[in-house]
Image (tube, rainbow, N blue to C red):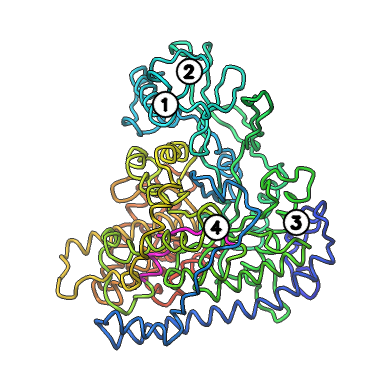
Amino acid sequence: MERIERAGLSVAPELVAFVEQRALPGSGVTAEAFWHGAAAILAAFAPRNRALLAERARLQQAIDRWHDAHPAPDPAAQRAFLREIGYLVPEPAPFTIATADVDPEIASLAAPQLVVPILNARFLLNAANARWGSLYDALYGSDALAPVGDVPGYDAARGALVVGWVRDFLDAVVPLATGSWRDWRGDAPALADPAQLVGRAGDHWLLRHHGLHLELVVDRAHPVGRDDPAGLADVLVEAAATTICDLEDSVAAVDAADKVAAYDHMLGLMQGTLEARFDKAGEPVRRVLADDRRYVARDGGTLVLPGRALLLVRHVGLLMTTDAVVLPDGSEAPEGIVDALVATLCALHDLRGPGAGRNSRAGAIYVVKPKLHGPDEAAFTDALFDAVEALFDLPRHTVKLGLMDEERRTSANLAACLHALRHRVMFVNTGFLDRTGDEIHTAMHAGAIVPKRAIRDTPWIAAYEDRNVQIALACGMAGRAQIGKGMWAAPDRLAAMLAEKIAHPLSGATTAWVPSPTAAVLHATHYHRVDVAARQRARAAEPVASLDALLTPPLAPAAVAMDAAAIRAELENNAQGILGYVVRWVEQGVGCSKVPDRDDVALMEDRATLRISAQHLANWLHHGVASAAEVEAALRRMAAEVDRQNARDPQYRAMAGREAESLAFQAARALVFEGAAQPSGYTEPLLHRFRRAAKRAG
């Protein structure tokens, strides 16, 4: 199909149609203003984008050469070298971020956060509506309290376990003035702290603790409530206060058609029109965005609470380009700049449309920016959104930015990065998966990396997690912005999550990622059990963790030879994870999925986890821990294993026995054998290449 010229740009016709027919009407922006503004921004920022990528390459080449010449570096010598080449920059003078006009879900509320692929409308709506969820359902339907059994119908013993756990939870976080919730009979609850009872809706009672709400659903006609002394049929929990709609790691968007589909879903969210229709148990279902929730307040007035999560959108980073827009010189436009233009245009409908404030009541646009390397790239992103705001006649700093602390150069210069974004930063988190991939790639020439499961026990990661919170607090983010932690990767192992993930609010983080609405409900209970604001006050007095520890790569001791069986197991573990994820990405366009591991335990995999596995094998190849023949053999063995695990998927195409023609197998192989040469160890260039080939092949 022929492309369309707009203001000197060559634009894919589907993007022109979307912008001019769907996104611009009602935005207050004309087509002429949009395209001429977009062309001017691309002309100004695309060359800067390319220069920053060239600087990444220069620094990595210098680090590789230095490690080749210094096999066992002294920490002081390494620091001096990194400062000399500009990898480490001077610390800014103490400062407090100046971000203003931020919704309370970002500024002050401590609660779980979901990340959802924007290309799946059903998942997107589920995540947007995950602001509220059933605590009874989350406990009963998961392994949180006991393994999920096969009792037909309602399991009364399991139900009693749930009811008892919830009563004990209420006793712990919203205690009664006298007695236990186990003895409550459904009347107006007399709380030890009366201010925690904030409203009611009919026979339902609304409680608030640590800023989060709990709704006691009293319904004596309900199958659960009729057998309960209080008539308590459920407890609804305010859970995912924020959701990141992801254009990046969890989607397979490789061309203009994919990007337009993603933008269209974003526009539907901002206009409130997105819906999903599907069959469930043989019945048609229509899913839409939830309404706000209304209660009678204690003073007799109306209390309105949001029915949906506050929505953020994660753009792509600086690396990739898109064929949706081609520049006058014939090169593809940087995809992140196109995201900034089109996704912000979509968000104007929340600011200016008939449902203004549907998402942000503060009049903000929330963008999560991934994979930034250091303060120069942070400053570039700040300037880019200055220009985008000017194009759309928005007040300066309307767009708030979330900084993903997931690249080594950002971690090492975190205060300087936050300073560059100080007028618009609204969140910083530890994206430990990508951060591990970048750690391996940066240290590619330093030595062989320890086995993957041992990386978490090496000094750099503890320093990374601590420094993220400590520096964020020192920069005044408490009460102004989110401090976040990473994903729980085992969506079917929620008992373990309930036991372990309380560590995230205990760290002083105000949010952490969870893999599902059910997990969000369970993780929300942690924010009732932990006073995050108090933890932040305590941690603010800590000294910042060692930079030298942060810069110590997770290398295996040179004197310790690895056991051949352990090497084989590690090769197979990585190969199985790579193939299990890549086969769905390349051949089905699924960017985030539950991939069974070697023990058939389903793990949430996206490009960040793929980056770790591919870089780990590339590192072991580079240092001779394993030979090319051994890696090749592991990939072939695991192709048969992945085929077995996907045997019930009618869309799946087997890899074993057809490795030479399988685009998925060839993509996985390239990620490993070309891994050391990939920019920053990223997987996107190869995945896009093979996915595009698969789409062309039908």
Mark 2 or 3, closer to the camera: 2
Q: CA distance from mark 4 to mark 1?
A: 47 Å
> Looking at the image, is mark 4 or mark 1 nearer the viewer?
1
C-alpha separation, residue under disc 3 versus residue under disc 4: 20 Å
Magenta-drawn segment: 425-440
Q: Is residue 338 in the magenta section?
A: no
Nearer-N-terminus badge (4/1): 1
Q: Residues within 10 Å of mark 2 (few under 14, many from 20)?
A: many
Q: Amino acid at mark 4?
A: Ala
Q: Earlier in the sequence, mark 2 or mark 3?
A: 3
Q: Which of pointers 1 and 2 lies earlier in the amino acid sequence?
A: 1
Q: Is residue 8 left or right of residue 75?
A: right
Quarter of the figure with the C terminus: bottom right
Up/down of 509 relative to 557, above or below: above
Residue at the (32%, 73%) spot, across then down: 548
Residue to which mark 3 is pinned: 18
C-alpha gap between disc 2 and disc 4: 44 Å
Q: Type of residue at label 3?
A: Phe
| Residue that numbered label 1 is attached to | 175
User: N-terminal of the two: label 2 or label 4?
Assistant: 2
Q: Amino acid at mark 2?
A: Leu
From this view, report whether residue 693 is shown above or below residue 311.
below
Determine which residue is flagged by label 2. 232
Q: Quadrant of residue 457?
A: bottom left
What is the spatial separation of the Cα atoms under label 1 and label 2, in whole angstroms? 16 Å
